[in-house]
Amino acid sequence: MNINITLIGQMIAFGIFVWFCMNQVWPPIMQALEERKKKIADGLAAAQAGEQAQEEAQAQAEQFVTEAKAQASEIINTAQKRANQMVEDAKGKAKEEADRIVEGAHAEMAQELEKAKDELRKQVAALAVEGASAVLGREVDEKAHADVLGSLAAKL
């Protein structure tokens, strides 16, 4: 192997090139790598914080849903109680109205019954007068015998 000046020149040029790269090229590359490393670490920390925030938000949402279900259940129970109360009130009012109608019907029936009895008494009295006049062979004066016919009708 011959060592000549070209080889020595190449070694010196290579040394200068290495020195230049170490002083001028290597620091910006390392700085860029450090910045990139820091950005990645910050991104991972942010992702982890985001996941934790998401878990907290999900827990809070579940709590809200649970509270909303409890409130809805309470509202439904209140509405159901109120509906039952309204039904009971309506039943009471309907019963009172039915009792009042039945009472009115009884009163009207009693009145109609008395009217029918009076009418029947009048008819019986008229028949009695007619029967008596047929039996006696002469006409009985209704006006003259009104007291007798009235007491007879009252007995019927």
Image (tube, grey):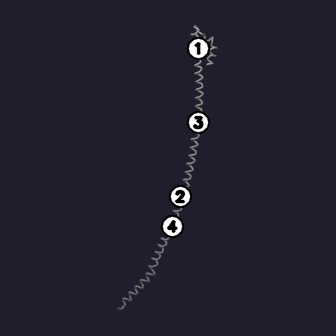
From the top left corner, tell me how far across and down residue 156 is, in percent. Answer: 61, 19
Mark 3–mark 1 distance (CA, rounded to whole Å): 48 Å
Q: What residue is pinned by disc 4?
A: 48
Q: What residue is pinned by disc 3?
A: 95
Q: What residue is pinned by disc 2?
A: 62
Furthest residue toward left: 1
Q: Is residue 21 left or right of residue 80?
A: left
42, above or below 107, in the image: below
From the top left corner, tell me how far across and down residue 83 is, in percent. Answer: 56, 44
Camera-nearest residue between 37 and 143: 143
Q: Which residue corresponds to the image point at 53% horizontal and 58% vertical from the top-left?
A: 62
Mark 3–mark 2 distance (CA, rounded to whole Å): 49 Å
- Amino acid type, label 1: Ala
Camera-nearest residue between 151 and 136: 136
Mark 1–mark 2 distance (CA, rounded to whole Å): 96 Å
| Secondary structure of the residue carrying numbered label 4 | helix
Q: Is residue 153 left or right of residue 9?
A: right
Q: Residues within 10 Å of mark 3 (few under 14, many from 20)?
A: few
The earlier-in-sequence mark between 3 and 1 is 3
27, above or below 6, in the image: above
22, above or below 128, in the image: below
- Amino acid type, label 2: Glu
Query: Foreground mark, 4 or 2?
Result: 2
- Amino acid type, label 3: Lys
Number of numbered labels in the structure image: 4
Query: Foreground mark, 3 or 2?
Result: 3
| Secondary structure of the residue carrying numbered label 1 | helix
